[in-house]
Amino acid sequence: MAEVKLKDVAKAYGEVKVLSHINLEIQSGELVVFVGPSGCGKSTLLRMIAGLEKITAGTLSIDGQVVNDIPPAQRGIAMVFQSYALYPHMTVRDNMTFALKIAKKSKAEIEAAVTKAARILQLTPYLDRLPKALSGGQRQRVAIGRSIVRDPKVYLFDEPLSNLDAALRVATRIEIAQLKESMPDSTMIYVTHDQVEAMTLANRIVVLAGGGISQVGTPLELYETPANTFVAQFIGSPAMNIFKGQITGTGAETRLRVPSGVEITSSVPSPAHLMGAEVEIGVRPEDLTVARGNELAFLDFEVEFTEKLGELTVLYTKPQEGGNPMIAKLPGIVFVDRGSVMHLTAAPNKVHVFHEGTSLHYL
Amino acid sequence: MNPLMQGIVTIFVGVGGCVAYFYLSNLVLDKVIFPAKGRHIGRNINRANKWRPWLFLFPAIFVLGLYLVYPVIGSLVRSMYNRSGDGFIGLGNYSTLLASPDFRTAFFNNLLWVVVVPAGSTFFGLLAAQLTDRLSWGNIAKSLIFMPMAISFVGASLIWKFVYAVDADIGLINALRAALFGSDPVDVLQIPFWNNFFLMMILIWIQTGFAMVILSAALRGIPEDTIEAAIIDGANPLEIFFQIKVPQIMPTLVVVWTTITVGTLKIFDIVYAMTGGNFGTDILPSYMMSFMFRDDGRATAVAFVIMLVVLPVMIWNIMQSRKEMR
Ligand SMILES: Nc1ncnc2c1ncn2[C@@H]1O[C@H](COP(=O)(O)OP(=O)(O)O)[C@@H](O)[C@H]1O
Ligand SMILES: [Mg+2]
């Protein structure tokens, strides 16, 4: 039960500014995911909340109390590290009880906490083993157990699944989701670079890029109305197609001319002063459909490569001027020859428009 | 023949001899003993291959036997003969040793050395490794602490003779005594019992550098995140050091400890150069030296006792370093 507030938080290593102007309020009981490309400062931000890194500027408060200068152990947080960080010389039980012993808790209290955590995480049979005698998934559960026994106000996870293989990652992801459900009051902050993890776990996602927060929102908000081209391309897989266009009509709907010369409509409203502006148009691969009957095709899609996955087919063009190919995701199995041209279209409410990188939604 | 020629000839004879040995011995095995022809061709080939490893192992086994096993057995035999080496007296030398108070003093002193020196060196080494870890000038400090490793034991003894000199103008200890208490100089090497510790100090001074270098590498090898996890768990620096760091480098600590123990058991030079084993500072190797060439039977008996004492430490040491490698 705790809210976490960051006000104008910044981090610099000497001259190098890693993060700046981080403003964020995390509600009590929320699971917030920090997501972003490698090296964007997710771990740094999390470690500042944990107290492992000094906060260069700004204030961090947990439960209304400013904790900038309070040591980690007194912040009421627990952290699960990417590499588990288990104490290799201690049994599972000792790993989980170390913090309680340091805090001089009573034997009975410690025993009760371990028994409960072990039951939740199905670790009871392994309590007397050393970490090296456990599988990766079990080690990760011990690391989580070490947090649970302390009953912290805020749980911090730094890419906890990235050392697991694909199948185990999905299973553990579900376990973490269930764990969160069983502890509705605890606040969790979860760092990942994997947007699927972010989408499936988060109440809210914080997208970090370029040393700041790019967008904060629920998973569906980020998917449906990305604030800028970065978020648009980061959330969703494969990434959103983006191509140039020009505004030819403004108002409650926007008219756009695409490179092929065709004019299309987007349901995003636009202000009058953007009339004639050069913009970027974004359409997700899964929103592209084959134009039928009198539907207006606006994308002549020259197929270079296809991937047939059974439930759907992914089509690629040659790389565009930006370096990335256009991608279309069509349901079912689609047979097309390389080099053949498909005429694709998209519904107006699926057409995103960005002016100088920012979505018209957020102007 | 000039030395250069001699060297060249030796190299050719040595390398040629090796090649010839391996070639000819294999030839004999394949053509003469188990020829790959005739009625038992399959069986012969199998047998030849079973024997072949031993052909390759033989030179090493032979040399090890000649230079290691034979001397051990030879010493054991010699220790059972009298002074002139012509009369067999069984365990006579050993019972004489046990009855001798000098031997018992040397044995007891040696035990002291074996306990104090490894403990002191490892303790100071660990302390130095931990304290210099995050220091900007840590590497300079480490080099200084490591420097004595490069000094021979006799050289180190000479340096410490100055430290212990019975003259407040030369000896550091007596200078301190004079400055602090105005006391007259004493010869610390003649203070019964405690003089042993002044000698041990020299070896600790030498070995601390060794312990520090190895332990410093081990400390660096501890995963940083286990320490961060302990910080979050609320451990203070002392708890982190003793409950998280030290247990994780325990195998290395044991190897350092036993390596220094083995080295300590072989020390002779320091005692010989500092006191010559007088004033009750004898240890087994210097005690042995006092009999060498006078009563080889007794000297080899002492040597054998030393070996028996070193052996278990040695075995433990090897077991630990193997465990660490795994
Ligand atoms: N101790 C440090 N000194 C200097 N730069 C650092 C240090 N730690 C991290 N950085 C830099 O901070 C940036 C963010 O790192 P990090 O938070 O680990 O990224 P992420 O977890 O998002 O992959 C990186 O560019 C990294 O190079
Ligand atoms: Mg990271």
Image (cartoon, coloured by chain):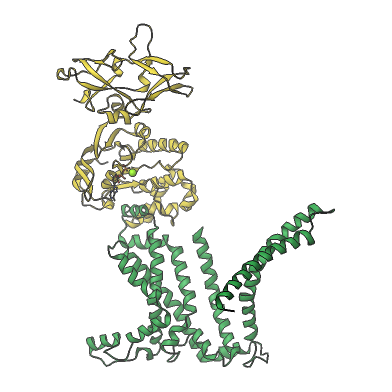
Q: Colour of chain B?
A: green
Q: How many marks?
A: 0
Residue farthest along the left direction in this orientation: A273
For the point 34% across and 61% down, the residue is B239
Q: Is residue A211 visible?
A: yes
For the point 75% across and 55% down, the residue is B46
Q: Colour of chain A?
A: yellow
Q: Against A357, is B271 above or below? A: below
Residue A343 or residue B31, whichever sits in front: B31
Query: Left or right: where does residue B216 sit relative to residue A138?
Result: left
Query: Left or right: where does residue A168 sit relative to residue B235?
Result: right
Q: Against B195, is A77 above or below? A: above
> x%, y% of residue B33?
79, 62
Residue A239 or residue A61, whichever sits in front: A239
Q: Quadrant of the C terminus of chain A?
A: top left
Query: Left or right: where does residue B102 sit relative to residue A52?
Result: right
Q: Is residue A108 visible?
A: no
Residue A253 or residue B30, whichever sits in front: B30
> x%, y% of residue B288?
53, 87
Q: Quadrant of ligand 2?
A: top left
Residue A326 or residue A18, whichever sits in front: A326
For the point 38% across and 49% down, the residue is A146
Q: Quadrant of the N terminus of chain A?
A: top left
> x%, y% of residue A97?
38, 53
> x%, y% of residue B41?
80, 53
Q: Quadrant of residue B275?
A: bottom left
Q: Quadrant of residue A290?
A: top left
